[in-house]
Amino acid sequence: MFKHRLRATIAGLVAVAIAAGGTFAGGASASTAKAASNAPLQNCTFKTYNKGRYLTAVGGGGRTTDVLHTDAVRARSWEKFTLVDSGDGSSTIRYGIQTKTGNYLTAVGGGGRVTDVMHSDATQLRDWEKLTLTSLGGGVYAIQTIDGHYLTAVGGGGRITDTIHSDATRIGSWEKFRVACNQ
């Protein structure tokens, strides 16, 4: 019930923003409208909060090593993701983050790791692929794994090795991402 009310509220806010000629959630007016209808949110980018670098699915996805980088200064195809509502009926909207290859990002072990943290080779949306985007306002989000940990852009981003951890238990600046869709 809460999930449906949230979607209806978001759809209403989007309609008001669009009618006023503006955008909603950091330029994601069209994507937020799609969220209200359960359709996937496409062309989504994740920018590290500290250094403003884009999250990259190396090779477009489909990997178990050298999976993610946080050093891109432009959003090209490997930096664009699709958010898929898991539709699991929970009161919190959980998303699968799909890469260019159609694979999902996986928080290995459900989260809580500093090595072998993420994979991008899942072909189905199961528990380890379900991530919660917690809005912090102004288009900034924390990304929470199924076990309640948060994703961290190590060093605030700008890295090609040891890029993401999934063991944070609180939201600090390295756990914040600017998310925008349909750009």
Image: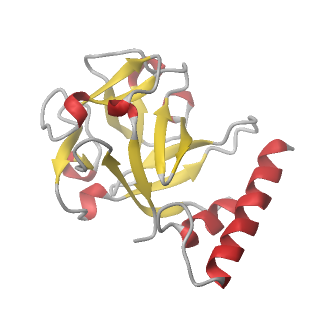
Q: Which residue is at a point 21% across and 42% down the rendered structure image?
A: 70
Quarter of the image for the N terminus: give it. top right
User: Does residue 137 show up?
Assistant: yes
The total number of labels drawn is 0
Q: Above or below — where is 136 with respect to 4?
A: above
Using residue 168 as the reference point, say whether residue 55 is left or right of it: left
Q: Which residue is at a point 82% across and 52% down the rendered structure image?
A: 5
Position of residue 182 measured from the top left corner of the image (x, y, whole percent): 45, 70
Using residue 19 as the reference point, say whether residue 23 is left or right of it: left
Q: Nearer the viewer, residue 98 or 114?
A: 114
User: Does residue 103 show up?
Assistant: no
Q: Above or below — where is 130 with respect to 38?
A: above
Residue 117 location, quadrant: top left
Furthest toward the left, the residue is: 160
Q: Above or below — where is 181 with respect to 169?
A: below
Q: Nearer the viewer, residue 57 or 61?
A: 57
Q: Nearer the viewer, residue 35 or 152?
A: 152
Residue 118 location, quadrant: top left
Q: Nearer the viewer, residue 87 or 45?
A: 45
Position of residue 175 measured from the top left corner of the image (x, y, whole percent): 38, 32
Q: Which residue is at a point 56% across and 70% down the rendered structure image?
A: 29
Snapshot colouring:
secondary structure
Position of residue 151 measured from the top left corner of the image (x, y, whole percent): 39, 29
Quarter of the image for the C terminus: give it. bottom left
Position of residue 161 measured from the top left corner of the image (x, y, whole percent): 13, 31
Q: Above or below — where is 13 with respect to 121?
A: below
